[in-house]
């Protein structure tokens, strides 16, 4: 096995479903970015591995976390602060994100995640210690939205309209399509987008994804 450097991502798959494991293996198969260290089925097996590979990223499914129990996962992550834990969520699991972040989960992929996005997400987790797929981030921000808008930081307060537009931006919509969807002018959308970028301190959509994620994970 080659020595791990910043050129590689050490990955451990933790799941007890053969179907899930095979899907995850397929996503990283032949990728020069990922070195698959091992596949484990229990938290006990995982603990013994991460004591050796303390910089690894752990990939599993939401259902495996539930089966193993958050009470087991929380101390495991707490004892090994250098590891990053990422999992796959289905749309009906989005309400569980707060609790998962609280136990130390650092990243979330969705059921429409592509191989390219998954590799990018793993790198973001390695570099920035968080990643949330755009469609999950958009849905989660909608869940967190209240009657006065969404605020996930003392420094960032979005109006109801800005939250609405941000959700569409995170779904990959252009200003033109957002304007059609909300029945407002493209100039108005561009104005809101400029305000959103200013509030998050970013200059483009790629930076916005990362900044919105960072606020969510420190909320």
Image (spheres, rainbow, N blue to C red):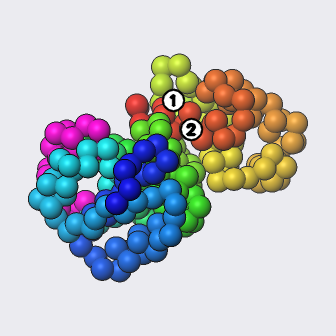
Q: Position of residue 68 (x, y in %)?
A: 17, 61
Which residue is located at x 80 percent, y 53 percent? 177
Is residue 67 rendered to the left or right of residue 2?
Answer: left
Which residue is located at x 31 percent, y 44 percent? 55
Q: How many marks?
A: 2
Rendering quarter of residue 201: top right
Is residue 13 rendered to the left or right of residue 136?
Answer: left
* Nearer to the camera, 35 or 140: 35
Toward the front, the furthest residue is 2
Instruction: Tell which circle, 2 or 1, labels the residue nearer the N-terminal end.
Output: 1
Residue ID for mark 2: 210
| Res. 77 in view | yes
Which residue is located at x 47 percent, y 36 percent? 128
**Magenta segment boundaries in residue numbering:** 65-83
Toward the left, the furthest residue is 44
Q: Position of residue 79 (x, y in %)?
A: 16, 39
Q: Is residue 78 in the magenta section?
A: yes
Is residue 196 rendered to the left or right of residue 133?
Answer: right
Q: Is residue 131 in the magenta section?
A: no
Most common secondary structure along the magenta stretch: helix
Nearer the observer, disc 2 or disc 1? 2
* Nearer to the camera, 19 or 3: 3
Q: Secondary structure at mark 1?
A: strand
Q: Disc 2 to disc 1, how far (Cα)?
A: 16 Å
Q: Is residue 102 above or below residue 122?
A: above
Rendering quarter of residue 81: top left
Residue ID for mark 1: 151
């Amino acid at each position: 096995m080659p020595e791990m450097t910043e050129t590689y991502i050490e990955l451990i798959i933790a799941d007890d479903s053969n179907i899930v494991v095979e899907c995850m293996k397929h996503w990283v198969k032949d990728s020069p970015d990922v070195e698959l260290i091992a596949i484990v089925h229990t938290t006990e097996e995982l603990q013994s591995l991460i004591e050796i590979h303390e910089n690894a990223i752990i990939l599993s499914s939401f259902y495996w976390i539930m089966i193993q129990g958050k009470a087991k996962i929380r101390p495991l992550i707490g004892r090994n602060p250098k590891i990053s834990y990422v999992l796959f969520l289905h749309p009906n699991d989005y309400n569980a994100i707060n609790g998962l972040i609280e136990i130390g989960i650092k990243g979330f992929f969705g059921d429409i995640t592509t191989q390219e996005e998954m590799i990018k997400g793993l790198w973001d987790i390695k570099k920035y210690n968080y990643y949330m797929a755009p469609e999950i981030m958009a849905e989660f921000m909608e869940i967190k939205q209240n009657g006065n808008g969404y605020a996930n930081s003392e420094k960032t307060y979005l109006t109801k309209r800005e939250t609405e537009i941000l959700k569409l931006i995170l779904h990959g919509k252009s200003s033109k399509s957002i304007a059609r969807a909300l029945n407002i002018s493209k100039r108005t959308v561009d104005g809101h987008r400029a305000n959103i970028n200013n509030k998050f301190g970013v200059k483009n959509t790629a930076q916005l994804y990362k900044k919105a994620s960072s606020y969510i994970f420190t909320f």
